[in-house]
Amino acid sequence: MSSTATKHVAIIGGGILGVSTAVHLLREGASVTLLTERSLASEATGRSLSWLNSAGERSTPYHQLRLAGVDRYRTLFAADPSREWLQFGGGLMWNAAGQREVTEARHAYETSVGYDSKLVAPDGIAALTPGIDAGAVPENAIFNPGEGWVSLPDLVEFLMEEFHSRGGRLVLNTGKSSVVLDGGRAVGVETEAGETYDADSVLVACGAATPAVVAPLGVEIPNGSPVSMLVVTKPVAHDVRAVMNTPRAAVRPNPGSTFALDHDWYEGRITEHADGTFSIPDDVVQELADEASKLIAGNPELKPASWKIGYKPIPGDGEPVFGELGQVPGCFVAFTHSGATLGLIAGELLAGEILTGNRHPMLATFRPGRFS
């Protein structure tokens, strides 16, 4: 412990990856300064569907990392199953009419890798999970019993209690921070206003902005981040427990008897303005809510209470980017599409790498050096 007791780490980004890594570092005796452009969870973490899963087909290392990610949430859930912001009610997905074989192939693949997957006819859904309008399912569906969801803003708030109790330093509203180099090595962070924070190591974990932050360091990380929207509805009585991924709406339960909704069909209706803000016609937001209503037993009227729009972090090749920059010793990055599922495990593994210098084998294929 003595070797890490004085190690100071500066983290750019107040989303789940930055906060999780910060807490794991503090647990191991490091001192941490966490800098956020605006408030905590103000970007992708504040508008994530945050479905905890490793469904479908992806590379084996990515699948294994996601399974470990879900496992860490299971441990957190087991400590207090009554938390309204972390629940395991399974996942239900289906494709559009005429895609029966596509769904069957996905189920066969999931089964082949040992992922808990049940292929179900519409009339069998009620026996597996409550609150769904089976009439919305054209042919067949897949139920994955082991999946869950988390409300990331609530998780960040939960982790920040530990962050503060362990002496972490939080610096809000720094604007766009940059990495400070000395002799090619990362030695701190400079805020937009010119304040500097010295550090032994720096972690850049600012979602879709991560490639832009490391670009001045001579590091190129391809950015495939699309613009997306998360809608939270007004409270409504319902029995839904599963996360639903369907052709026209993705839906998950959310604290306070609300729902969180997203999809991609309306991406072209989002306008990005010169000042960096986004807008979308109100009728498109209501259309998404109407699509979600069709999936829920009794088809309750869903009214949007709020919606947030911004970039959904996705690296150019779709795979996570984790670890130290080869060209810039002392500078680490965390940039991934699956920030929710990987939030706890990525923070744990990155903290270990930052403190010990030992590269974790589960991150071997996700190194930023693959792009250079």
Image (cartoon, rainbow, N blue to C red):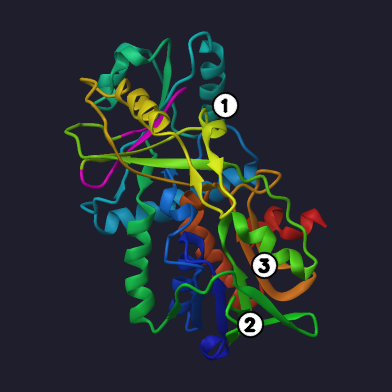
| Residue 180 placement: quadrant | bottom right
Out of 38 and 132, give the one closest to the viewer: 38
Relative to 23, is 354 on the left or the right?
A: right
Label 2, on which residue?
A: 188
Label 1 near label 2: C-beta < 8 Å?
no
Q: Whole-Å distance between the Cαs marked 2 and 3?
A: 22 Å
Report helix, strand or loop for mark 1.
Answer: helix
Specify the amino acid type for callout 3. Answer: Arg
Residue lying at 56% horizontally and 62% vertically, measured from the top left: 206
Marks 2 and 3 close (CB-CB < 8 Å) = no
How dense is the environment of label 2, judged by Cα within 10 Å: few (below 14), some, or many (20 and up)? many
Q: Residue 83: within the magenta?
A: no
Please report whichever mark, 2 or 3, sits nearer to the chain's N-terminal start. 2
First to last magenta residue range = 242-256
267 to the left or right of 159: right
* Whole-percent x, y for residue 104 in the image: 52, 17
Three-letter residue code for mark 1? Tyr
Q: Residues within 10 Å of mark 3 (few under 14, many from 20)?
A: some
Q: Secondary structure at mark 3?
A: loop
Which numbered disc flags the more N-terminal residue, 2 or 1?
A: 1
Disc nearer the start of the sequence (1/3): 1
Residue position marked by numbered label 3 in the rendering: 359
* Mark 1 residue crowding within 10 angstroms, few (<14) / some (14–19) / many (20+): some
- Front disc: 2 or 3: 2
- Taking the spot 31% from the left edge, 12% from the top edge, the residue there is 135
Say which amino acid is labelled 2. Gly
Q: Is 227 drawn above or below residue 265 in the view shown?
A: below
Q: Which mark is residue 156?
A: none
- According to the image, label 1 marks what residue? 109
Residue 327, horizontal then vertical, whole percent: 80, 70
